[in-house]
Every structure is written in C-alpha cells, then in structure tokens.
Image (spheres, rainbow, N blue to C red):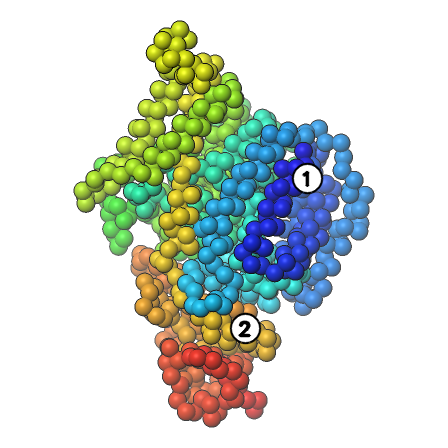
Amino acid sequence: MKLPWLALALATVALPLALGTSPLDVALYAGYFAYAVVAPGTLLYRAIRPTPQSLLEDLTYGTVVGLLAETACLAAASLLDLRGWLWAWPLLAIVPLARHRRSPDYPERPSAAWSWAVAGIAAGFLAYLTAAFLAVNPPLPTGGAHDYMIDQLNLLAVSADLKHHFPLAVPEQGDRTLGYHWFAYGHVAASSLISGVDLPVVWFRLDLPVLAVLAVCLLAVTGRRVAGHPWAGPVAAALMFTVGELVPQRQAPAFFGSITAYYSWSSRSLLFGAALSMPLIAAIVSVLRGGGRRDWLLVLLFAAGTTGAKSTIVPLFGAGVAAVCTVHLLRRRPRWTPWLLGGSLAAITVGAVAVLYGFEGQGLRWGPFAIMLDFVGSQRHGTTVRDVPLILWGLGAYGIAMGARLAGVLLLRHWDDACVFLAGTTVAGVAGTLCVWHVSWSEHFFVVAAWPCAAILSATGLVRLPWSPRALWTALAVAAALAAVSVAFTLPVPRHRWWVPLPVYALGALVLVSALLLYLLSHRLSPRLLDRLLDRLWHRLLDRRAGAFGALVVVLFAGVARLPFDAVTNANLGLAYHIRITPDQVAGARWLRAHSTPAEYVATNVHRVGGSGLMRGQSLAYWISAYSERRVLLGSWGYSPESTESQSRAHRIGPALTYWDPARLALNDAAVLDPTPARLSWLREQRVRWILVDRAHGTPTAALPTLTDLAWQRGDITVYRLRTP
C-alpha cells in the first residue's frame, strides 16, 4: 500500500516548506538523504541481512546502516583531509552492490490499515515537534532578537566542529578533545557537507522531521518482528511517540521527567540513539532465538554504532541479556548464546568508553533517588534513611505516571528469552534513572534509552488479547475523555511535600476505575441486563469477548494529552533555559565563517549569557562557534568536561560559574580588551587570527584598533583581524 507512505513523505517535505525553508534547500537535502543514506545503506543491509522480511524493513534498517557508514566515512575523510570528496562515498556501496537493487519477493506485506496507522503516528509526532520546536525556532534570528534554548546552540556548535575538524573538540575551548556520543552531530555535519545546505537550516528545519519519521517506522517494524504480531509495531510506536505520562497536566511533579515530551527535540542524540537502537533490539532477539552468523554480524554492527549515538543504550541492553543468563541459570538450562552475546556487548561498551569517551566519567555519580531531590532530601546531601516513607510515596506516583503505558506487561503469559531481554533492559533503565545522579539531570536518559524495549513488551501483551473494532474504538473514546479530564483536572493541594504526588494518585484511581467499569460492563454483566440498564446503548458499544482488551487500552492511552499540552504550554521550554541572540551577533559570526578558514581560531570576550534573563551570568553562550563554525580559543566553559567534573565532585547542579584556570582566562581577556604586542603574539601562538568583541560584555581599550585591523562592525559586535608579523 503506497498511498500512506506517499502522504507521509509529502507531509515531511511540506513541513519545512511551510516554515519558510527554501525549496532548493529542501530538494538538496531530500536528494542527499536518498543518495547518501538510504540508497547505499539499503544495499549494504541487503548484502548482510540473513533473509528478507519486508520492503519497509529493508529501507528503515538500511537507512540506519547508511547513517553508520556515513559516520565512518566522515571520520576517515576528516583524518585524511578529504572532506571535499565525502559526497562520493555512497558510490563505494552503490557500484559494487548494484546486484542488490532489485527487491526480492518479500514474505511480509503490510496491510493498508497497518500502513495508515504507522503513517498517522508519525504525522502526529511531526505535529508535536513542529509546535514544540520547529515553528518557534528560526535558523537565523533575522526578524529581531530570538531566545534560543542554550543546549541547541551548544549542539549546533558540536556539529559545526565536526564539519571542519576531527577528532571533536569542546566547543569554545580551543583544541580540548571532547569525549562524547557525537554520531548524531556527525550526521548533521555530513549532511551539510554533502548537500551544501547551511548548517543552521539542517539543524532547525530539515534533520529533525526526517529523523522523527524514521524513528517511528523503525519502532513499528521492530515491534512487529520481535513480537511476531503485525500490530505490536504500531502499538509500540504509539506508546512511545503518541502517549505521554499519565499526570494531571497542570500539576505534574517536576521530578517525573518524560520519555518523548521535551527530550525528543532538546537532545538530538536521544532520538538518533533511539532510532539506531531499534535494529539492535531486533538483531539481539534474532540471536537469542538461534540466529546465524549474519545476525551476529548485525548485532556487532548496530551495537558499535549505537555506542556512539547514545552512551546509555548498549549497557542497558547488556543488562537485559544478563537477565536472560540469570533466568537460564535459575531454570538450570544454561546456553552459551546469551553469555557470548553479553560478553560481546560488554566488550563493545569497554571499547567505546576507551575510544569515544576517553574513560571520562561524564559527571555521573551514585545517587539513589536523585531525580526526586526537589521533592525529598536536599541537592547538597541527597537522601537519607529518614526520607524512605516520602520516597516510597513519590515512587508510587512515579510508577503511575510512567508505568501506565506499560500495563500490557501484566497480561503477558508466555515469557521467552526475547520478553526476558526486553523486561531486563526496562528494569535496568528504570534502576539507572532512580539510582544515578548527574549535574544536568541526565539520569533521566537511562529510562528513555530503555523505553523502546518497554513499549514493545507492553504492546505484545495487548495484541495477544482477544479484541474487536467496537471494543477498540469505545476504549479509545474513553481514553480520550480521560485525557481531557487530565488537562482540566486540578486539586487544591497545600504547599507540603506529602501532597505533591496526590493529584497523580487521584487521576490514576480515576483511570483505573474507568477501565474496571468498562471491563465489568462488557464482560461480567449479561446482555439482557445491559439492555435493561443502559437502554441498548452500551450493548452496542461494548464487546463481551474483548473486555480485558478494552480496559487495557484505556489504561495505556489515557496519557495521550501529554504531548499536545506540552506543545501548547511549554513550546521551546518556555524561557527557562535560554539565551537571547540578536541578528548582529549572528551576522558577525557568519561574516567570520565567510572570511576565515577552519584553521584560524577566534578569541573573544564573550564568556557568559548576557541580558536580564534567568540564565544571566551562566557560562553558556555558544553562539559564536555555532554560527561561525570556527573554534574559539576560550569562550564559554559551562558544558566542558572540567566543569561537569568539578560540579559533580561538589555535588552541585548546573554548570560551573568559575573557570578552573583563572590565569589563562585573565590572559585571554587582557589580550582581547587591552592588547599589547606580546599578548597578541601569544594569541597567534594559539592559532588565533581573529578577535570578536561584544561591547555588551566589555569595552576594549584604544590599543585594540591600533594593533589590529578592523574587519567588520555592526551594533555592539566588532571583528578584528590580527596582523601578520
């Protein structure tokens, strides 16, 4: 059935056009993605997969292979200084693998209903991303100053560095190497290099919609394959990309976090990592079910790629495999396969820690229930034994909010190795979130990384129940009504910690009562009694054979209001974590990009967020490196490894306010604002050839224009060129 996919493709293309993106940029990016990712990746996947399953699997899993191959080629081209030839890498796969261009006779062909369901879920996810992020963030602030979320400019700076340098360096810290899961940002850099589309346009308009559609389709395909039921895929995709947390929308405790709301657009590596993890799930399950050498090859390929996409994923999958090993030991039926699989994942993880992350701790610390520190305990000292009653009270609400979508697990009767692996990964993700502390609240990433496994497991429990269309639509109507209630629902809660989770308990009780009532009306009562009590109306809406199915659908989908509510009330995270960027600032940075080379570094007096916003004074101003695509000798340091480690040792949330090398900072600022020939000579030794001054952060002395050449000026922004000795 081609019509649903054609409609989805047209919607994906029309979205950036509707937001004002140049048709040429859209065409160039679409051509790049088809030529440099989908085509070579699909041919490579067909060459190594064991047996064909469906065209959609070949295209989606092949796209993941294409992304990984593109990343490897970007690294190789960067090391060999051949970035200008990166556009030719797809030919290395397309030419020798031309014999795989013909599609085989696939045993699986999705139905029209299945295709429309997946396309609808993807379109709904696109609508959320548009309202929450895309529509409120122009690539350039041309119409006046704009408030950008700080993380977005930092990650854009990471992509800009990978576009011109390798290995990756800390943005605005010169040559300081950064150990990071950079594959998502390498893809953004490669897409700009190959397509020729401006990097901010790729970041704020083109990359995210394509990645979102890919992630939905990947989960639908993986769920279908792992569960062995066609509808497990769309249900799993809906449980991750449509349904949110079951909370009163106006009284949701902050420590709950989320799975898709906010995180799906704020951290590109989360969505990219989720997409790459789904073929890995399928490959691991195939190996556990007795797959051959090609399945093992796919496990190694996808695991190696996923470690560079998001660092939390492969360790959790290793924990899931460890759960399988444990169950085998308890049943006294040990097999070598899970042990070899777990050892392989462990070896890949250790290799990634050494090669990609340089054995850096990334600021993680042991911290039981640290996500609840704004509710119980203290940020400085954590939680104690005295806090246990309040912790348990909060965990109950957390279980309702996050776990309602996983209720399908309770109805699973047959647990094979695949189900144990999925459950073990889910438990490990929840445990990681509850037991780890991080300076930037990144402990939430553990449960997010495990959520595809959780969604597939819950969907498997649902689709194995007897069902009927009548029961489905009735249950969805009840779930929609409960979702509407969650938006309007509020309780007069006193300002006491014990009362904070109470609205969640109340809403959870309402959902549970509604589900039980639906079950009793459809299953326990006789049709004659139904006719007598409800005047035939309920009898027409309910199906006795599918009572459990309808009740479960109500519980699973009652949180469907979360994403729309977030998009309407909290688009772009409001103004909580932003920096105001002016057209003059961006114009100065982009002038530098046009008139300098990547080998020429920039010195600046911009180290902190200016203005009067909530983040004023924080060292998180990354707009120079983001828009100039040039390395800055010493700019902001808030997201540097040294900042993270110092804050972690002191058990403080957020970036470090002070720079760890005050003498170097003072020398940089003196060379920029009060230069002398000796100070400028020091800058040249550090590869600096340009100085960007923002007068809002300090006015230079008359020596600067005397000893350097004025190159560009507008408003408070001035760019100077260092003279050649």
Location of mark 1 (residue): 58
**Residue 650's spot in the image, x, y percent?**
31, 59
Quadrant of residue 597 within the rendered picture = bottom right
Measured as percent of width and height from the top left, residue 419 is found at 51, 29
Three-letter amino acid code at the position of disc 2: Arg
- Residue named by callout 2: 590
At a point 41% along the width and 16% down the height, the residue shown is 537
Name the side, left or right, on which 126 lies relative to 612: right
Res 363 quadrant in image: bottom left
Residue 574 appears in the rendering: yes
Label 1 to label 2: alpha-carbon separation: 40 Å
Residue 3 found in image quarter: top right
Quadrant, the N terminus: top right
Residue visible at 70% across and 44% down?
42
Can you tell which mark lies on residue 468?
none
Q: Choose between 644 and 630: the one closer to the eye.
A: 630
Neighbour tally class for label 1: few under 14, some 14-19, many 20 plus, Cα within 10 Å: many
Residue ID at (56%, 51%): 15
Residue 448 percent location from the top left of the image: 45, 43
Residue 352 visible, this angle: no
Left of 440 or right of it: where is 710? right
Q: Position of residue 142 (x, y in %)?
A: 49, 68
Q: Which of the two discs, 1 and 2, labels the residue nearer the N terminus?
A: 1
